[in-house]
Amino acid sequence: MAPVHPGAAGHISGMTSDGSWQWTFRPASEGPERREQFATLCTLGNGVFATRGTAAFDPPASAGYPGTYAAGIYNATDCVIEGERVTVESAVRLPNWLPLQCFYAAPAGGEETALVPSLTNKTLDERYVLDLYHGILHHHLYLEDPAGRRTRLHEQRAVHADHPHLAVQKLTVRPENWSGPIRVEAGIDACQHNAQVDRYDGFNTQHLTGFTLSDPTDDGVVWLTCHTTRSLVGIALACAVSIPRSSPATPPDGVPGGRDVHTARGCHVAPDRPATVHKVTALRTGHATPPDTLRERVLADLADVPRVEELLTTHTRSWRAHWQSTPRPADQHRADILRLYCFHLHQVINSHTARIDAGLPARGLHGEEYHGRVFWDETSAIAWLSHTCPTAARACLDYRHRRLSAARREARSHHSEGARYPWQSGHDGSEVTVPWVKNPLSGRWQRDHTALQQHVGAALAHSVARYARQSGDITYLHTRGAEMIFEIARFYATYSDHDPHTGRFHLRHVVGPDEFHDIYPRHTTPGIDDNAYTNVMAASTLHLAVALWDALPGHRRDALAQDVAVGNDEVLFWDHLSRRLFVPFHDGVISQFAGYESLSRIALDRLADRYDTDLGRLDRLMEKDGDHPRNYQVAKQADTLMLGSTLSPAELTATLARLGYDHSPATWRRTVDYYLERTVHGSTLSAAVHASVLRRIHHPAAPHFYAKALTVDLTPGHRTELGIHLGAMTAALELAASTEDSDGVPGVDGSEAGE
């Protein structure tokens, strides 16, 4: 395979693209971290569940970390941190349906041996091929045992695109220079708990209980049921295994790999008579659904399933149709990377997701970082999906609308009205940010105040407007969209604090997108005041709400007046507030927050020399030494500059002018340069945001950040092994598709077909 285009310099070592539709990984000489990173990037999913791209014969604790996750399935557990009882809600790692292994028949008086890479079996060749166009992962393995027997194994795997509860494996076993009996064993590994993220080791990560397992049978079908410990989500899996010209086989005592349910078949193979193993797995979950009911459903799924070859045909046909209707990447030089990102986005959210209650997790359904929660990363995803897959974009918005009641409760908990959308959301839309975070460098627990970020609602309000504008779905804007926008505006109006001396309003005790600055130095009350991004976005949201109210047809205005109790007097106050929120400035630039200029200046180049590592997690580096970035003029990621990405230049200028601030291109350019030299880019989204901002002002650093944005999940150091970064991926897609005029039509030019 040809190497990845030079634009992707620094891609995963051992992973290449042929420039179009296939990505190949050769694990030889690669360490566990690279293999886990590859397992993330070769995850297969269909919007209902997804499974990481590990080997079917991997034991549970091996490199690669097998993991299956279902959209919208969370569970909460309790633990004690620093003497405080804490509840932690997480996406749930489900039982592993992948196990599929072959064994040489045992010689007389001896033990059978597995056809897997081992200290005794020599691996002559091994490669994985991710076929984006057909949605299939291939695993090729060529082995030689101590007796000189050479065998080729080829597994094809698919999480079915049309049948949202089915997955398929097809394994071909082809002897090269021998013949004889083999035994094939397949099953489901029930021994799963969330154990991927080392710094979560202080949490209770056991989420499954109540296991019921089938007995081994001769018909090749086994099943397993369980449920989550607190959310009481029922889970059922069943698999059926068949091999032409085979017979039932009895597995030995003690099942390798810790599988809890399994079935075995025996057959004879020869160079001219390979064995083909078919395994179909059905997986279902259900809130408050009895596991026995789910078991009946998965067994019915298997009873009704077509032949494996037909399943693979319909699956690949569905993926081909998807690509035919997907806009072709505007940046053809990096089309392979952009297709990979489109592939993963489609696996997380699509028409199947629109029929269930699930949001867009920041790390996809690909791993356990951030506990599988929903952040504001959906903002960039909705921007992309609004013009490529409006149904999926609307599903993201509907996830938020269904949690409008929870957002109202969150607002009340902040002594406000309206809707306050949380920084981290999971099952029911409550704020689930854990108030403690562990620094893996020092081993110490630190207070986490990031739940004070009050800008998520503003981003959501603008996402609703953008969706309506790009999809043409004005009905949504005038119904569910308006309900959310009005309630979000109401939150900012009631959360704001009026200063009678200046006539300005303030948003106090907040945290901005930067996250480093969550409390003032030498203060005890968390939060900072008047984060510029939050205040400007709040003002823009208030203006959006006023404009929407004015544009509503009379009957819709009357209905909303009843549904959300909004009226003309309240809207008039929103308009006033949109003109009187305070925005801090200093030295001719927009201040990140009030008092930012009084913080100490610090030279990032000196810090880089001091720590001799990337400064992205400067908070961890400094905390280990008893210091913290909150004391300095330094940002983890784009904060003030997010304004130049979320809002168009015209919108930003108009919003600041409405607030009474003179905002010229020169002021913005000074602001951009000011924060460029103070940002360590500790977020994967930072490169895309900076590329967008810099491109709009024709800054010479724009190409550098664009190249970085496109390869975030392909380069080491971003913890992709713990899950993809959907926000960064979709921001890169939107960035590649956009014209320099941010108000213009995205630069897509039709569709393309694969081979």
Image: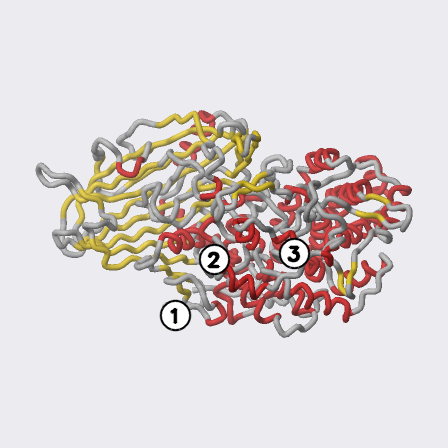
Look at 58% across and 51% down and name the residue there: 627
| Residue 467 versus residue 202 in the image, above or below | below
What is the secondary structure assignment of the residue under circle 2? Answer: loop
Q: CA distance from mark 1 to mark 2?
A: 24 Å
**Which is more N-terminal, label 3 or label 1?**
1
Q: Could you tell me the amino acid type at mark 1?
A: Ala
What residue lies at 22% left-to-right and 47% top-to-bottom?
A: 115
Residue at mark 2: 717
Q: Residues at badges 1 and 3 in contact (C-beta under 8 Å)?
A: no
Q: Is residue 13 left or right of residue 104?
A: right
Nearest to the observer: residue 366 or residue 79: 79
Asked if labels 2 and 1 touch by Cβ distance under 8 angstroms, the answer is: no
Q: Quadrant of residue 433?
A: top right
Looking at the rendered structure, the kind of residue marked 3 is: Tyr
The numbered mark at residue 632 is 3
Place of residue 603 in the rendered image (x, y in percent of width and height, measured from the top left): 61, 64
Could you give the CA–CA distance between mark 2 and mark 3, rounded to whole angstroms?
24 Å
Q: Position of residue 122 (x, y in %)?
A: 20, 55
Q: Secondary structure at mark 1?
A: loop
Where in the figure is residue 406, as x and y percent of width and height?
A: 68, 35
Helix, strand or loop for disc 3:
loop
Disc ID at residue 2: 1
On screen, residue 511 above or below 388: above
